[in-house]
Image (cartoon, rainbow, N blue to C red):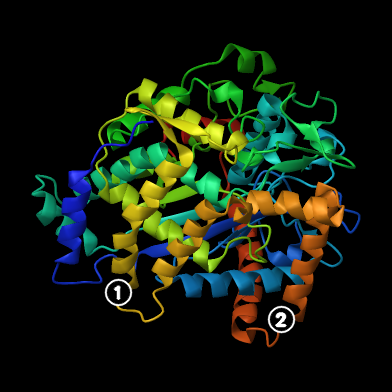
Amino acid sequence: MARTRLDRAFERRLSGLVNARERAVLTGGLKGVERESLRVRPDGHIAQTPHPPALGSALTHPHITTDYSEALIELVTPPFPSSWELQQYLCDVHQFVYRELGDELLWATSMPCVVGGDAEIPIARYGSSNIGRMKHVYRVGLSHRYGRMMQAISGVHFNYSFPAGLWPVLEAVDGSRLCGQALVDDGYFALLRNYRRYGWMILYLFGVSPAVCRSFFQGREVPAALQSLGRGTVYAPYATSLRMSDLGYRNKSQAGAHVSVNSLEEYVRDLTRLISTPHPEYRAIGVEVDGEWRQLNANLLQIENEYYSFIRPKRVAFSGERPTRALQRVGVQYVEMRSLDIGAYDPVGVSQRKLLFLEAFAALCLLRDSPPLSAELSAQYEANHATVASRGRERGLALWTEQGTLALTDWAAEILDQMQGICELLDAGEASRPYSAALAFQRQKLVDPSELPSARLLEDMKRQGMSFSELAMWMSEMHRDYFRELYPPNGARLAEFRDEAAASLEEQRAVETRDTLPFGEFVTRYTQGSLV
C-alpha cells in the first residue's frame, strides 16, 4: 500500500501561522448552515399541504424557505463567527417552525419518508412573479430530467469563509505574487481541489444514510447491491451515505459533466459551457409546449445550481444575477460544503462538534499543497467519494491515490494527524480546547467503526426491530417533542421570526406588483445575464 507524499508546503504554512504575530489568525471565520427537511404527516407520509403561511414567503424569506418540494423546508442561518451562536440560532428557528406545523413533523433523516411515487412529491411554488415562476419551472424541469424521488432527498450544507486577517499572513508565508481578491480566489480554489481529494472523509465520518424505505424504488427495480432488512427496508451493508451514492445526488446522467476547479476562470468557463450546450434528450422533453413550461431550456444544465457538486464556491448575488456572473464580478466570498447527511441523532440536523471539525477540515484543504487537477484525476478522486458512500465501512477498503492504492483507515489517520496542529491554532488558548476535542472524537471512530453514525443507525434498526421508516419516524417525534418542550423559549428571537415572516409576505406581493416583463422574455434576459 502506498502512502501519500510528504507535504512540505503544508508544514511551511502551518509553521507560518503558528509563528504569526496574531496567534488567533485562523479564528473567527464566518459559519452558516442550510438545513433541509421534509414535512411529514403523523402517518409517516410526505405532507401534501402548502408551505405554512405563518412561516412567511418561501420566495422572499431570508431564513425559512423551501427547496425542491413544497414539503421540503430549508432553514438558512445567517453567518456567525462562533459555532455556539450558529447552533443557538438553529435551535431557535426550529422551535419557531414547530409552533406552526400543527401535527406535522420534520423528517429526521436524509433519505425520504414513505412516498407513493413521484405524484406524492409536490413541486415547490413561489407565487406569480417572474422570479417565482422561474424557480418553479426549474423544479418542473428537474422532475422531467431526473424524477421527483431524487429531489426528495435532503441534507445539510455548511457555508464557511475564512477570517480576513488570514490572507495577508498566507501571502507573506508563501511569498505570493498574488494579493487582494486574486489571492483569496486562488486560496478557495486550492480548497476546492483538495476537497475533491479528501472530501470522502466527510462521508465516512458523518454519513448516516445506509438504508432507505423500499418505497423509494416504487415502480423501479431495487438495485442488486442493496439487501432487504425486515419490513419495507433496503440497505447496503457497508454504506455510509446512500444519499451521496449513485442512488442519490451522484446521478449518472451528470457523470460526464466535468467542471474544473483549477481556477475561477476555468470553473466559470466549464459551467457556462454546460448551461449553454443543448442536450438531445432534453430537447425531446420540450421547453414551452402548448403554453406549459416544462423546463427553462433544453441545455445540459438549466442553471448553475443543477450541477450537483460536493462543494461550491459562492458569492452573494444581486437579485436576478447568475451565480457565475456574481463570481466573475467580485470573486469568491465563501464555500458551501454539500456532502453532509442530516444528523439523524441531532435535533437541529448537525452538532456543534461536527461544525468545529468541518471548520478545521476546510483549513486543512486550504493549507495543504493543491496542484491542478486534470479531468482524469478529478474523476479518479470523485470515484473515491462514490466508493466510500456505498462501501465505506467495508473491512480493508482501499482508495485510489496518485501513488497507488491506500487503505482508507491509514489515509484517514494521516489526515486527522495533520489536522491536529490546525485544531490547536483554532483553539487559540481556550481552556476546553473544543476543536481538539472534536478531532479526538473523530479519531475514536477509526479505532471503533461501530461508532460511525451509519453503523449506529443500522444497529439501532436491528436492535429495536424497526424498519427504516419506523426508526426515522421515532426520531422525528423525539426531535419534535424536544423543541416543543424546550423552555424557556427565546422570546426576542421568536418575535423576530414572526416579523420576518410578515415582512416576507409583503415583499412577495411587492415583487409580484413590480413585474412588467412577459415570462418568456424574463427567462431569456436572465439566461443572457441582462437582468442586472
User: Is residue 373 among the parts visible in the rendering?
Assistant: yes
Residue 10 in picture, x, y percent from top left = 22, 49
- Left or right? Give the position of 52 relative to 420: right
- Left or right? Give the position of 526 relative to 498: left
The kind of secondary structure element at disc 1 is loop
| Picture quarter with the C terminus | top left
Picture layout, residue 227 above or below residue 129: above
First-in-chain label (2 vs 1) = 1
User: Is residue 50 among the parts visible in the rendering?
Assistant: no
**Identity of the amino acid at label 1?**
Ala
The residue positioned 40% from the left and 42% from the top of the image is 411
Which of discs 2 and 1 lies nearer the camera? The answer is 1
Q: Which label was assigned to residue 486?
A: 2
Whole-number angstrom distance, CA of label 2 to CA of label 1: 32 Å
Q: Is 421 or 326 nearer to us in this picture?
A: 421
Residue at the spot of label 1:
428
Picture layout, residue 369 above or below residue 364: above
Q: Is 320 or 331 nearer to us in this picture?
A: 331
- Left or right? Give the position of 340 relative to 422: right
Q: Which label was assigned to residue 247?
A: none
| Picture quarter with the N terminus | top left
The kind of secondary structure element at disc 2 is loop
The residue positioned 65% from the left and 38% from the top of the image is 238
Picture layout, residue 424 above or below residue 108: below
- Left or right? Give the position of 422 relative to 276: left
The residue positioned 62% from the left and 43% from the top of the image is 240
